[in-house]
Image (cartoon, helix red, strand yellow):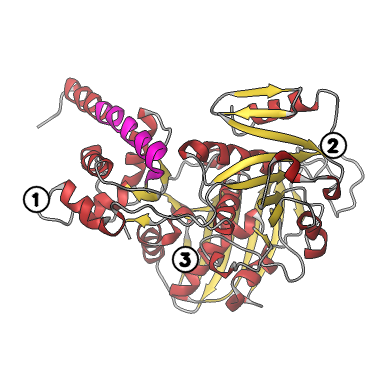
Amino acid sequence: MTQKPDQYLSEWIDREALAEAMIPLIGQLYRSNNVSSSIYGYSLVNQSVIAILKAHRFAHYRSFDNSELSIHETFPLLKAISELELSSVTVDLGKLAYKFRKKSASYSAKQFAYEEMADVVGQQYTIASKGADVVLYGFGRIGRLIARIMIEKAGSGGELRLRAIVVRKGAENDLVKRASLLRRDSVHGHFNGIIVVDDDNNTINANGNLIQIIYAQNPAEVDYTQYGIKNALLVDSTGAWRDAKGLSQHLACQGINRVVLTAPGKGKLKNIVYGINHNEIIADDKIVSAASCTTNAIVPVLKVVNDKFGIVNGHIETVHAYTNDQNLIDNFHKGNRRGRSAVLNMIITETSAAIAVTKVLPELAGRITGNAIRVPTPNVSMAILNLNLAKAATREEMNEYLRYIVLHTDLHKQIDLVHSHEVVSTDFIGSRHTGVVDTEATIIQDNRVVLYVWYDNEFGYSCQVVRVMENMAGINLPTFPR
């Protein structure tokens, strides 16, 4: 029977009404109980009606039975969860709904939710470093995005609290300019909230987060305890120091306890890709590196492919957006080719990603080479993984396996998939995943596979840095379903 236009509209209005009803439940769980809800890794906190409905639609492309996730499935589960006594957990409503589908018709959402989360009902989850102070040393592209993410996540009371930002003073109106750069971004759009500047006290109030701006030429000039900052985690995004000796300058400052570097670490520093080797961080590790954006994008995909099919060898070609390290117009640069205009040229350059891969995945040592081409786009890059496998596979096998990884493993925040012949780089601005495999572009011939992995080299990487920070601070919330 053919549906009438009025029926389509009626169904849409019905879904809108349910999404509107979900918003206060999501907010209450988040702000009162520190319970974060999502759908297949897409956060529902502080989202609009349309964003919630789109999250359900996106889930359609991740399901094995090719059926759309209905808000009529997730709403009863969310309502049931809101009636439980929960604290400090994360809940994926998409995955819960997928499990709930397998239950008999007589099984209620309330009964299912209770049984799934029984071991944490009525219990206060203890966070090792509740309210850990954070200092951002440097406030460039990555520093500002980390600030945005932290401010966004602070609505529940915040396990990580952004207390201070350290920069070199550039002008008399430096504070206003820094706030403006946080408020407006040519790539990532406007800051989602309210920013108030206090020139007298050198502070920025962003959505209730009072952030001290500290002006210093080097780490030795700062005593953080005079601002009430203690045992803080410092994030160095300047790139000025990349080894233990240089970064140890921060540890010599009063108030700083641990350091995270937002660049590949040199020497014996641990290079951490969250989701792959974050469990290697121990209490004695005072300084760790969050590796590079490209390393974070390719390592999770390489890991799962190697686990299933085995990687004999391969080459990674990175098509990378230009960065601030390059020149806008032709001028002197100490690096090869980087002196030529970034906005006019494709530029062959080196990448440390292939070497960094072996630091995170030692089993691939000597098997991976890499190179990079900088292209005239300001954000979003692509890694082309040209691999020779130990076990032959078909295109369908590879794509189905990767979809399984996204649906049923802990790497759902690192790896995502896109199934479209029409996507281009700007479609991935703001992606919180470290890499998005373009399944329509996958090429396989016997044992040789070519995978195309999109990644937001700014925002997706910043999300990974925050995950490393949470791990360093001892914030590892239980995730449901198990």
Q: Using a 10 Å C-alpha cutoff, classify the residue at mark 3 as few (fewer than 14 neighbours), some (14 to 19) or many (20 or more).
A: some
Task: Name which residue type carries label 2.
Answer: Ile
Q: Where does the image place residue 20, in percent across and percent down from the top left?
A: 30, 27
Which residue carries the number 3 mark? 444
Q: Give the answer, above or below, for where 391 lies relative to 193.
A: below
Check the picture and name the quadrant holding the N terminus.
top left
Q: Mark 2 near mark 1, Cβ–Cβ under 8 Å?
A: no
Horizontal arrangement in the rendering, residue 362 relative to residue 82 (left or right) = right
Q: Where does the image place residue 479, in percent across and percent down from the top left?
A: 38, 55
Magenta stretch prevailing secondary structure: helix
Task: Name which residue type carries label 3.
Answer: Ile
Q: Where does the image place residue 81, in percent across and percent down from the top left?
A: 26, 45
Task: Give the mark, 3 or 2, whose residue is nearer the N terminus.
Answer: 2
Q: Quadrant location of residue 274?
A: bottom right
Which residue carries the number 1 mark? 105
Image: magenta residue range: 16-38
Q: CA distance from mark 1 to mark 3?
A: 42 Å
